[in-house]
Image (cartoon, rainbow, N blue to C red):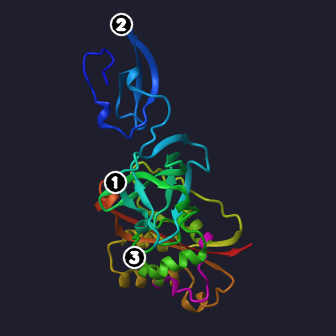
Amino acid sequence: MWNDLYTKKLHNLKSYPNYTWYQTATGTKGNSKYVRVSNFSETKVGWVWAGYLSKGYNSKGYQVTRKRYGRPTYAGGPFHVASTTKNAYLWDWTHTKVRANLKDYTNQNLFKRHSVRMKHSGKETWYAYVTVKTKHGDVSGYVAASLLTPGKTTNHANTDVVYPDDFTSTTDYLEYIKDSNYQKLTRSMMALFPNTPVDLGMSQIAAHNYSNRIYVDGDDGDDAVSTKGYKDIIVFRQVSKYLFDNRAASNETKIAGVKKLLDQAGYPQSKRDKMTDYKLGIYNINNVPISNLWDQTPGGKMAWYSLAVGKAE
């Protein structure tokens, strides 16, 4: 394989016996016909004497026969890996190297960048190109599309932070609050409203419309959501501001302050006990360190506090 000026040898194709080469141009050198080709990933591109090549896909290994970007089938998301026991290997484009086993990352939402159809031993299978976050950084590759399920994951195990729009239902949200080590403050605040059930929709409204939080670099904070479906919304702004201003304090100190502020606002425990016709909107990220935010927020920590109640229409 030569460069465009035929002055430098770039690659010896015999070193890549499993590759299919894709023609991008044709030309001549003297009386000889040459073709400009690339591999699938376009990391190897150059001119080859046409006599070295045969038309058609390579019969060896895995060969990409189609590439699609159409949404939602071939690109977009979210998707997740449904099985925690079945191997779901993430391959490189040659299908010769495993980059990760996605059964270990069923707590992540995945988004398809594109899909390819790979041919192997006469059988063709669709694969999706996705990226997963690992302790070594982001890893991308191809996974069999049949191993992915549309929708957001409900497995939040070993996940320090789940953002408000990444829950699928109130049940899903409550499981996260119950199991997460970083939701102790939220559990204590819920106990202050013993007869007011937590509601995901109301919690998303509180988080997006009435919160105090640290904004990541580049985030303008304009993410308000509709309050449709709820009425008589009561916002405890003084509580979220207090929690944000005292985000480094202990949970005991924070809860004491929340109780005092609720009392001052005219909602002592006796009144809160009777709020059975309201839904509780609560969402907290309690000054949690997040590795990928170390250079985007103070100390690499995220703080996000919100509290409100409303009635379902």
Predominant secondary structure, magenta span: loop
Quarter of the figure with residue 16: top left
Which residue is more in the foreground, 284 or 158?
158
Q: Residue at x 41, y 27 (%)?
A: 53
Q: For residue 176, which numbered disc appears in the image?
A: none
Q: Is mark 1 on a helix, strand or loop?
A: loop
Which contiguous range is marked in magenta?
A: 188-201
Which residue is more in the foreground, 3 or 165?
3
Marks 2, 1: nearer the viewer: 2
Residue at mark 1: 296
Residue at mark 3: 182
Left or right: residue 57 versus residue 18 is right
Q: Residue at x 46, y 72 (%)?
A: 84
Q: Position of residue 174 (x, y in %)?
A: 54, 79
Q: How many labels does the image show?
A: 3
**Marks 2 & 1, CB-CB < 8 Å contact:** no
Residue at mark 2: 30
Q: What element carries label 2?
A: loop
Q: Which amino acid does label 3 sit on?
A: Tyr
Q: How far apart are marks 2 and 3 (CA)?
A: 71 Å
Q: What residue type is labelled 2?
A: Gly
